[in-house]
Image: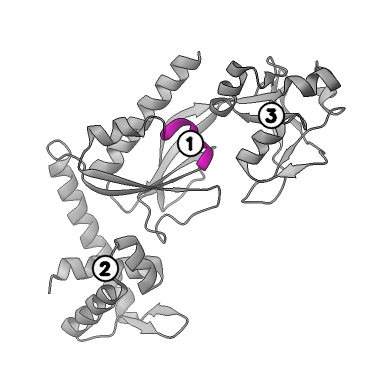
């Protein structure tokens, strides 16, 4: 039995909370994962997990062993990474989660260059706006906007930022007129975007000399999907506020017109987050470096 491999599988089962979840993230058959844990328990002479039809829990021995497994595996990863950082090309499979709009607009148009540069590295992109548990779902990293919350479990690497742009279609403005101030927005049709995390409408924050001004929309139409939200603006249903990287192609094409260009908020940071318990692997490091340059190039082209 390869004990190091068995320890990795056991740790993944604990993190995923199930044999099926571990098997999925490890790309192994469920039977292989289950058999590996059974062989490890047999070799140790103790039960590590309490199994029922609905749950999986660590025994006291399992908890003790898992703590030491994590320490040993982290040390091994750290040593291997430090040896390979300067000599080894990133390889294997990199699992990254990000929003579909960011992937479609920024990442996918240029991802071929990244794959060409690192021929031994495969990427699995999971897309959506839902909150994810990086460790439990077996992700290597996630791309998120906003200021990351302080976490004992995650490390956040800043890779860039974007600005918000308020806009509407030419047809909407021809029918309803151009807002000239923030107060004018209250007399217009404003499309609400409901956060998938909170279920509430996202407030619009504008910068001001005496601080920041929050605009709380009271639109008759609300959506919780970015593509649908942009479609509302393109169809002339109301005013929307979207990230600059999403707005600029439509502004250049003339399908949307910027509103109140002098009213803007602070740039929104973009970060790559990965588990603190893991050394920054060559694959994640390569992805972070590539994303940083990509966003810098995007800002330069848009300036």
Q: Looking at the image, can residue 281 be seen?
A: no
In the drawing, what numbered circle is on residue 234?
Answer: 3
Q: How far is the residue under mark 2 from the one under mark 1? A: 34 Å
Q: Residue at x 30, y 80 (%)?
A: 48
In the drawing, what numbered circle is on residue 9?
Answer: 2
In the drawing, what numbered circle is on residue 104?
Answer: 1
Q: Which residue is drawn at 84% across and 28% down?
A: 188
Place of residue 34 in the rendered image (x, y in percent of width and height, measured from the top left): 28, 77
Q: How far is the residue under mark 3 from the one under mark 2? A: 49 Å
Please say whether residue 103 is one of the residues in the magenta stretch. yes
- Secondary structure under tag 3 reads helix
Q: Which residue lies furthest to the right in this view?
A: 187
- Is there CB contact under 8 Å for labels 3 and 2? no
| Picture quadrant of residue 178 | top right
Q: Nearer the viewer, mark 3 or mark 2?
A: 3
Q: Is the magenta stretch mostly helix, strand or loop?
A: helix
Please say whether residue 22 is one of the residues in the magenta stretch. no
Q: Which of 24 and 77 is in front in this view?
A: 24
Q: Residue at x 85, y 29 (%)?
A: 186
Q: Earlier in the sequence, mark 2 or mark 1?
A: 2
46 relative to 296 in the view: left or right: left
In the drawing, what numbered circle is on residue 270?
Answer: none
- Secondary structure under tag 1 reads helix
Place of residue 247 in the rendered image (x, y in percent of width and height, measured from the top left): 60, 25
Q: Which residue is drawn at 66% across and 46% down?
A: 224
Label 2: few (<14), some or many (≥20) within 10 Å? many
Label 1: few (<14), some or many (≥20) within 10 Å? few
In this rendering, is residue 181 above or below 11?
above
Span highlighted in magenta in the image: 100-108
| Picture quadrant of residue 2 | bottom left
């Amino acid at each position: 039995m390869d004990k190091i491999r068995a320890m990795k599988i056991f740790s993944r089962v604990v993190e995923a909370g199930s044999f099926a979840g571990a098997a999925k993230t490890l790309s192994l058959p469920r039977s292989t994962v289950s058999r590996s844990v059974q062989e490890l328990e047999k070799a140790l002479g103790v039960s590590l997990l309490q199994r029922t039809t609905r749950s999986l829990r660590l025994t006291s021995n399992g908890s003790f062993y898992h703590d030491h497994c994590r320490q040993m595996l982290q040390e091994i990863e750290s040593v291997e990474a430090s040896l390979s950082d300067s000599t080894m090309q990133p390889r294997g499979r990199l699992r990254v989660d990000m929003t579909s709009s960011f992937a479609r607009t920024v990442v996918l148009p240029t991802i071929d260059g990244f794959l060409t540069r690192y021929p031994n590295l495969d990427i699995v992109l999971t897309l959506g706006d839902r909150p994810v548990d990086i460790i439990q779902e077996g992700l290597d990293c996630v791309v998120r906007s906003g200021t990351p919350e302080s976490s004992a479990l995650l490390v956040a690497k800043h890779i860039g930022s974007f600005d918000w742009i308020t806009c509407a279609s030419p047809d909407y403005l021809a029918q309803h007129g151009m807002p000239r101030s923030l107060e004018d927005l209250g007399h217009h049709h404003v499309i609400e975007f409901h956060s998938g995390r909170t279920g509430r409408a996202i407030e619009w924050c504008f910068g001001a000399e005496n601080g920041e001004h929050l605009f709380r929309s009271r639109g008759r139409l609300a959506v919780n999907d970015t593509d649908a939200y942009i479609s509302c603006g393109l169809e002339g249903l109301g005013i929307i506020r979207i990230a600059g990287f999403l707005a600029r192609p439509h502004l250049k094409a003339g399908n949307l017109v910027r509103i109140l260009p002098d009213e803007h908020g602070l740039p929104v940071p973009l970060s790559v987050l990965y588990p603190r318990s893991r050394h920054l692997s060559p694959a994640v490091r390569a992805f972070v470096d590539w994303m940083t340059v990509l966003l810098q190039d995007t800002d330069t082209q848009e300036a």
